[in-house]
Image (tube, rainbow, N blue to C red):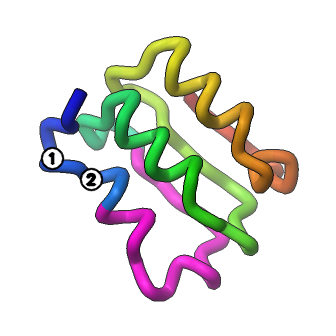
Amino acid sequence: SESSLGGAGAAVAGLPFRDGVRVLGLRNAGLRDADVAALAAADWPALEELDLSVNRLTDAAAAALARAGWVRQLRRLRV
């Protein structure tokens, strides 16, 4: 389903400076599973911390994150 922020996950994933992002805080951002899937599909080579807590996420979001190759490089993940 679409995010209440109008596809926020895809918008964040499309940021041109994404390669340098080390900490991404999206706590209480109104994200849904589709947003997390868009984030997970993007490349985050420098990301060390990701906060997705207090969003409307289900097991589908967790599965999308688990498939993301970059998730193993995280030092902290909050969902």
Foreground residue among 67 and 19: 67
Q: Which residue is mark 1?
A: 5
Foreground residue among 41 and 29: 41
Check if mark 1's residue and mark 2's residue have beta carbons within 8 Å: yes
Residue 24's x, y, as percent? 53, 60
Q: Residue at x 40, y 77 (%)?
A: 15
Q: Which residue is mark 2?
A: 8
Say what secondary structure mark 2 lies in: helix
Q: Mark 1 is on which residue type?
A: Leu
Q: Relative to residue 7, is residue 12 depicted above or below? A: below
Q: Residue at x 86, y 47 (%)?
A: 72
Foreground residue among 65 and 50: 65
Residue 41's x, y, as percent? 57, 52
Q: Mark 2 is on which residue type?
A: Ala
For the residues labelled 1 and 2, the Cα–Cα distance comes to 5 Å
Pick the quarter of the image with the N terminus. top left
Asked where in the image residue 68 lies, by quadrant, the reply is: top right
Circle 1 Cα neighbour tier, 10 Å, few/some/many (<14 / 14–19 / ≥20): few
Asked where in the image residue 79 lies, by quadrant, the reply is: top right
Residue 77 forms part of the magenta stretch: no
Does residue 53 appear to the left or right of 22 in the view shown?
left
Q: Residue at x 58, y 48 (%)?
A: 40
**Magenta region: which residues?**
11-26
Q: Relative to residue 77, is residue 79 depicted above or below? A: above
Residue 65's x, y, as percent? 64, 36
Q: Residue at x 65, y 67 (%)?
A: 44
